[in-house]
Amino acid sequence: MPPSTAVFAFNTVFKTMEVFATYVDATVRVPGLEIAEGDWLFFAGDGSSLNAVYSVDPFVRDGGYSNGVYDLQPGEGPNLMVFLFDMCRGTDGIWMWPFEELKAYFDLP
């Protein structure tokens, strides 16, 4: 992935989205251990899914831990638009916000 590609990072614990100017910024700021625990989902600037691929695995043992070393690479999974729309759908299947309003708010095509 080009280093200048923007990255959207969604925290599944706090239900917040962070946007990083480059994928390097994302890999520096998001702890690898939290990713391994399922706390983060990543999307490229074009909305495609990204996966963390570890060159050094994170671990917790003997009272210590390591975040490991990872890189973000194209992954399997929903794109950002599908993910956001699924998040905005109520439990009864009815949209909580109008579709066009969501597209405009997130500046999506």
Image (cartoon, helix red, strand yellow):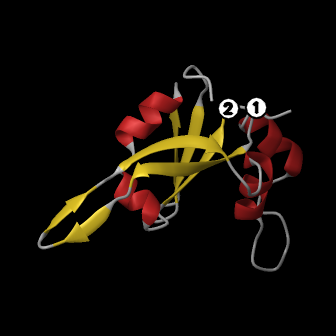
Left or right side of 88 for 100: right
Residue 106 placement (x, y as % from top left)? 72, 37
Tag count in the figure? 2
Q: Is residue 51 above or below residue 33?
A: above
Inter-mark Cα distance, 2 to 1 = 11 Å
Give the residue displayed 73% in from the left and 47% down from the top.
Answer: 80
**Is residue 102 found left or right of 51 in the rendered image?**
right
Secondary element under disc 1, as helix, strand or loop, is loop
Q: Which residue is mark 1?
A: 107
Name the residue rendered at 77%, 56% in the picture.
Answer: 78
Mark 2: amino acid: Gly
Residue closer to the observer: 73 or 13: 73
Q: Residues within 10 Å of mark 2 (few under 14, many from 20)?
A: some
Counting other residues with Cα less than 10 Å from the Cα at mark 1, is it few (<14), some (14-19), or many (20 or more)?
few
Looking at marks 2 and 1 on the same chain, the residue that comes earlier in the sequence is marked by 2
Residue at x 57%, y 19% (from the top left corner): 4
Q: Is residue 93 above or below residue 8?
A: below
Point out the image quarter for the N terminus.
Answer: top right
Q: Which residue is under mark 2? A: 45
Of residues 51 and 15, the one nearer the viewer is 51
Amino acid type at mark 1: Asp
Look at the numbered disc 2 and give the secondary structure of its residue: loop
Q: Residue 100 versus residue 107: which sits nearer the camera?
A: 107
The residue positioned farthest toward the left in the image shown? 63
